[in-house]
Amino acid sequence: MKYLLYLSLIACFIYGCKAVNKTTVPIKDENLEALKRNDTVTIVNEEEAYEIIIIEPGFNFWVASQARPRGYYSQSFMENRNHLYVIEWNQRVLQPHRYSPNLYELQINYDHVTDYGYEVNYLLYNYFLYFQRTYKQRLGPFVPRI
């Protein structure tokens, strides 16, 4: 009985000494917080009749806080990478028994000959980086680095 009492006291002591970390980081940039709440990116070019919609929680925040700035990569670099990533992505969409259909839901209609412009290639390239890093996937021979 004495040991049971000691064990109970020790358990209460350990539980009571458990560190509680309730520190909050002050919001320094309200724009980044707004990006966390808005999880949809839409780019529309009515002249070329294409539209890109990215619905991914946290993607806007990731682009604003961690991705390389616009102008860091050349458009041709991103077009080449996007072409390779889209091929692999579409192959995985067509193999739901092998790859999770929750991750690879829809095919991406990306024509490597079409000039989509810098912004579309920038966001698509960064989405592929975000996707690979977040879901621990590898869409090509390149390690997804920022």
Image (cartoon, rainbow, N blue to C red):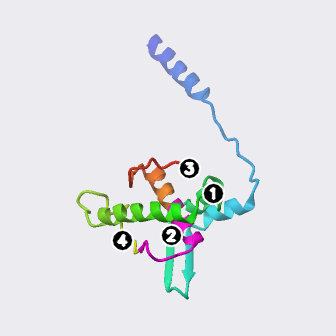
- Percent x, y for residue 95? 25, 63
**Residue at far top of view:** 2
Q: Mark 1: which secondary structure?
A: loop
Asked if residue 113 lies left or right of residue 72, the reply is left
Amino acid type at mark 3: Ile
Residue in the picture at 60% in, 68% down: 38
Q: Mark 3: which secondary structure?
A: loop
- Percent x, y for residue 65? 65, 54
Cα–Cα gap, marks 1 and 3: 11 Å
**Residue holding disc 2:** 54
Looking at the image, is mark 1 or mark 2 earlier in the sequence?
2
Q: Residues within 10 Å of mark 1 (few under 14, many from 20)?
A: few
Cα–Cα gap, marks 3 and 4: 25 Å
**Residue at far bottom of view:** 47
Looking at the image, is mark 3 or mark 4 earlier in the sequence?
4
Q: Residues within 10 Å of mark 4 (few under 14, many from 20)?
A: some
- The reply to whether residue 91 is visible in this rendering is yes
The relative height of residue 16 versus residue 86 in the rendered view (above or below) is above
Asked if residue 51 lies left or right of residue 61, the reply is left
**Residue holding disc 4:** 107
Asked if residue 24 lies left or right of residue 42, the reply is right
**Residue holding disc 3:** 146
**Residue holding disc 1:** 72
Residue in the picture at 68% in, 60% down: 33
Amino acid type at mark 1: Tyr
The relative height of residue 13 versus residue 124 in the rendered view (above or below) is above
Looking at the image, is mark 4 or mark 2 earlier in the sequence?
2
The residue segment tinted magenta is: 110-126
